[in-house]
Image: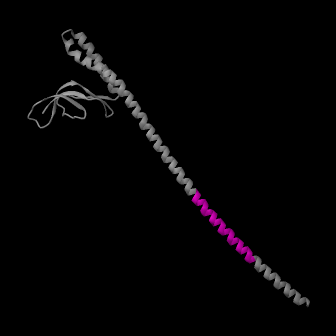
Amino acid sequence: MSEENQNEVDNTVENDQDENLEDDTEFSEEDELENIRSENESLKKEIKNVDDKCLRLAAEYKNYQERSKKEKLSIRIDSLVDAVSSILPIVDDIERTLPSFADAGEKYEKGLQMILKRISSSLKSLGVESFGEKGEEFDPSIHNASSKLDSDDEKVIISEVYQKGYKIQGKLIRPAMVQVKG
């Protein structure tokens, strides 16, 4: 073979090799690009899953905090109810005794009124409310009617209070013992 032909064959072989290399390069670049895209999608899914887990964990923690706060408040209120319940009979005794001290002397009566006022303000500072006054409308969920007087009124009204009722933050400590008419 002549040198020219040999050169031509060599050039043709080189060109074919270059084309094959280019094809291989293109093919491998496309494969690599596809792999990168696939990996990118996979990472996006993983990030989304981690985000979801974080959001759920944050929501669970917030719910835990709220539940814990409610439980603590409930325990506090229950403790106050127990403590106030043990003090209320003393308040009742003072209120019942007060009218009889009117005859014993003004100083005794005034002293008992001061004690009663101080106890009442202490209970109020704890959030304890008293209820059950003459003239109020009767509510069976917070009043205990011990007797009833007949009346032409359609409404059932408290006519006499035997024992005040108490509640704290809406929770009933003791119902009011009353006489009603209506």
Q: Is residue 29 above or below residue 142?
A: below
Residue occupying the point 25% across, 35% down: 141
Q: How is the image coloured?
A: one colour
Q: Is residue 154 above or below residue 100?
A: below
Verify whether residue 139 appears in magenta: no
Q: Is residue 155 left or right of residue 167?
A: left
Q: Is residue 38 left or right of residue 7?
A: left
Q: Specify the quadrant of the image occupied by residue 12.
A: bottom right
Between 171 and 126, the one nearer to me in the picture: 171
Q: Position of residue 101 (x, y in %)?
A: 21, 12
Verify whether residue 33 appears in magenta: yes
Q: Is residue 26 above or below residue 150?
A: below
All told, the count of numbered labels is 0
Q: Specify the quadrant of the image occupied by residue 150.
A: top left
Between 70 and 124, the one nearer to me in the picture: 70
Classify the position of the N terminus by image quarter: bottom right
| Extent of the magenta region | 22-46
Residue occupying the point 24% across, 28% down: 176
Q: Position of residue 7 (x, y in %)?
A: 87, 86
Q: Is residue 180 above or below residue 24?
A: above
Residue occupying the point 85% across, 87% down: 8
Q: Position of residue 33 (x, y in %)?
A: 66, 69
Q: Main secondary structure of the magenta part?
A: helix
